[in-house]
Image (cartoon, helix red, strand yellow):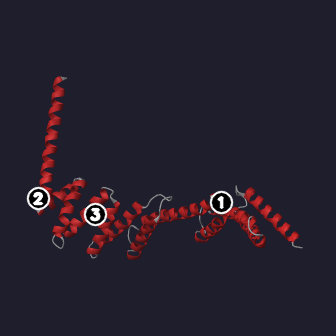
């Protein structure tokens, strides 16, 4: 037992000594001016998947080798190292830079694709600001315009569906939010715009129902001179909803709004005779 403990201690001591020596040598390499040695070491670290060390060395090398031999390789390996570390913002910037500097490189297409793919990975959940989602869509579409026969097209199409789905969900939640906060006019207009923009949306049933409900609440609380016109729109909206979703779980509630709208219209007409 004592022998095993001694062996373990020796092993830990040797490992610690090796790491300290390695760290010391790495620090000297980073601070040194032997750029050829730095380049060889950076590529070695990249191939060993020691990406954080490779990144620091490649950052040292980029300016020194700008316009010289190895410049393209350094730029590429640097971007790939950042990507491996999931630093999508920095990697995307690096791949866009690579594409601009080396547009005729055999890696140019892949660089532009990876730049767009980094944007995809930066895209947040639907309930957050969707600026990056829109940028990712634009980046993918730009890539497809330039490389319509790329092997990445099927994957891009899948990602585009996902990204557009986020925008759709975001727009629906915004419109539905107006209904929840009883801003019925804004809800009606927003839901109508949503249905116009996304005619095949999976949220069509909900959107049509809440548009009808918002239309009723907005209409019934309008001034008398506008009430009849707005309630008649509720009747029309119900007819469309009933045609599209005659077995909807919302149908009973929709029929209640329809009946109330019809009754209010009849009352208005009787009062004006």
Residue to which mark 2 is pinned: 32
Query: Which quadrant holds residue 263?
Result: bottom right
Rendering coords of residue 257 (x, y %): 76, 61
User: What crowding class fits label 3: few (fewer than 14 Cα within 10 Å), some (14-19), or many (20 or more)?
Assistant: many
Mark 3 or mark 1, earlier in chain: 3
Q: Quadrant of the C terminus?
A: bottom right
Mark 2 or mark 1, earlier in chain: 2
Q: Quadrant of the N terminus?
A: top left
Residue found 27% across the figure and 59% down from its top:
81
Residue to which mark 3 is pinned: 79
Q: Does the image show residue 272? A: yes
User: What crowding class fits label 1: few (fewer than 14 Cα within 10 Å), some (14-19), or many (20 or more)?
Assistant: some
In the image, is residue 78 above or below residue 13?
A: below
Mark 2, mark 1: which one is toward the viewer? 1
Left or right: 213 with respect to 21? Answer: right
Rendering coords of residue 162 (x, y %): 48, 62
Verify CB contact (< 8 Å) between mark 2 and mark 1: no
The one of 117 and 27 positioned closer to us in this rendering: 27
The one of 148 and 134 positioned closer to us in this rendering: 134
Query: Which quadrant holds residue 92?
Result: bottom left
Q: Does the image show residue 107? A: no
Left or right: 234 with respect to 177? Answer: right
Verify CB contact (< 8 Å) between mark 3 and mark 1: no
The one of 68 and 209 positioned closer to us in this rendering: 209
Mark 2, mark 3: which one is toward the viewer? 2
Label of residue 182 in the image: 1
């Amino acid at each position: 037992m004592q022998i095993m403990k001694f062996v373990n201690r020796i092993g830990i001591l040797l490992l610690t000594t090796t790491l300290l020596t390695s760290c010391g040598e790495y620090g000297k390499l980073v601070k040194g001016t032997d750029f050829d040695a730095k380049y060889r070491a950076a590529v070695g670290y990249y191939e060993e998947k020691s990406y954080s060390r490779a990144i620091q060395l490649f950052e040292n090398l980029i300016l020194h080798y700008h316009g010289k031999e190895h410049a393209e390789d350094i730029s590429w390996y640097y971007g790939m190292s950042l990507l491996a570390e999931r630093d999508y913002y920095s990697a995307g910037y690096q791949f866009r830079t690579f594409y601009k500097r080396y547009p005729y490189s055999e890696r140019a297409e892949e660089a532009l694709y990876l730049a767009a793919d980094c944007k995809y990975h930066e895209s947040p959940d639907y309930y957050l600001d969707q600026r990056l989602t829109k940028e990712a869509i634009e980046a993918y579409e730009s890539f497809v315009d330039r490389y319509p026969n790329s092997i990445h097209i099927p994957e891009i199409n899948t990602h585009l569906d996902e990204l557009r789905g986020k925008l759709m969900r975001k727009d629906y939640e915004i419109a539905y939010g107006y209904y929840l906060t009883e801003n019925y006019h804004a809800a009606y207009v927003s839901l109508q715009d949503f249905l116009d923009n996304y005619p095949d949306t999976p949220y069509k049933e909900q959107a049509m129902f809440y548009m009808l409900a918002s239309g009723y609440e907005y209409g019934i609380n309008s001034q008398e001179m506008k009430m009849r016109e707005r309630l008649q729109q509720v009747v029309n909206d119900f007819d469309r909803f009933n045609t599209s979703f005659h077995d909807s779980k919302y149908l009973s509630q929709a029929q209640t709004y329809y009946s109330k709208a019809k009754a209010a219209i009849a009352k208005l007409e009787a009062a004006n005779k």
